[in-house]
Amino acid sequence: MARSRESTPPLECVVSDLTLVVGQLLRRLRSANPGDLNMSQSSVLARLEREGPMTTADLARAELMKPQSMKTILAGLEEEACVEREPHPTDGRQILFAITRKGLDERKRRTAAKREWLLAKLEQFDPKDVATLAAAIPLIKRLGDSTLP
């Protein structure tokens, strides 16, 4: 049975609360794994791992940022030897950025630390609460996959 609109909190409260708790969770996950890479750099490494080598412009579009900002992120990752440049296979004017072995290792290390922290915390939760969180995952994913207006 669908819940009536009166029994749900106002959308403004849901938005405010969700924004707050998601931000807190992200900060906590980051603090569980201190390191040199920031969230943007980690996101770029994850995308390169998933999708393979990409140009600066393609990465900027995919990460919803300006190409100048992406250049700064890639410069930092290149300095840390987490990405390397490759020639574009069909356009000699373009450069592709690819994740290196060091970049893969760094991603795995950071992902493992976050997972270990989250697993340890969830093991302390009541099974009903874990089930509630699991049920919310598709909704949160749908929010994250939404395009901006």
Image: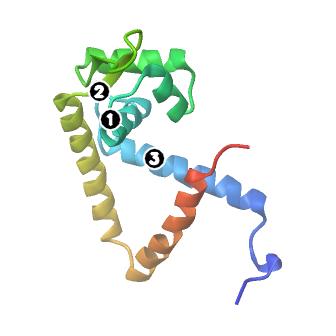
Nearer the N terminus, badge 1 or badge 2? 1
Label 2: which secondary element:
strand
Tag 2: amino acid: Ala
Q: Quadrant of residue 17?
A: bottom right
Q: Residues within 10 Å of mark 3 (few under 14, many from 20)?
A: few
User: How many numbered marks, from 0 up?
Assistant: 3
State left or right for residue 103 relative to residue 89.
Answer: left
| Alpha carbon distance from label 1 to label 3 | 25 Å
**Residue 79, position in %: x, y?**
27, 14
Quick check: marks 2 and 3 in contact, CB under 8 Å? no
Q: Looking at the image, is 78 positioned above or below residue 24?
A: above
* Of callouts 2 and 3, the N-terminal one: 3
Residue tagged 1 = 52
The numbered disc on residue 98 is 2
Looking at the rendered structure, the secondary structure element under dot 3 is helix
Asked where in the image residue 18 lies, by quadrant, the reply is bottom right
Residue type beneath disc 1: Gly
* 71 to 139, vertically: above or below: above
Task: In the displayed orientation, state which residue is furthest to the front.
Answer: 90
The N terminus appears in which quarter of the rendering? bottom right
> Residue 114: percent from the left, percent from the top?
31, 50
Labels 1 & 2 near each other (Cβ < 8 A): yes
Q: Which residue is mark 3?
A: 26
Three-letter residue code for mark 3: Leu
User: Residue 70's x, y, as percent?
Assistant: 47, 21
- In three-dimensional space, the C-alpha distance between marks 2 and 3, rounded to whole angstroms, equals 26 Å
Q: Give the residue drawn at x 48%, y 27%.
A: 58
* Nearer to the camera, 126 or 51: 51
Q: Look at the image and tell me in which quarter the C terminus lies.
A: top right
What is the secondary structure assignment of the residue under circle 1?
A: loop
Answer above or below: position of 41 versus 3: above
Where is residue 121? Give x, y as percent: 33, 63
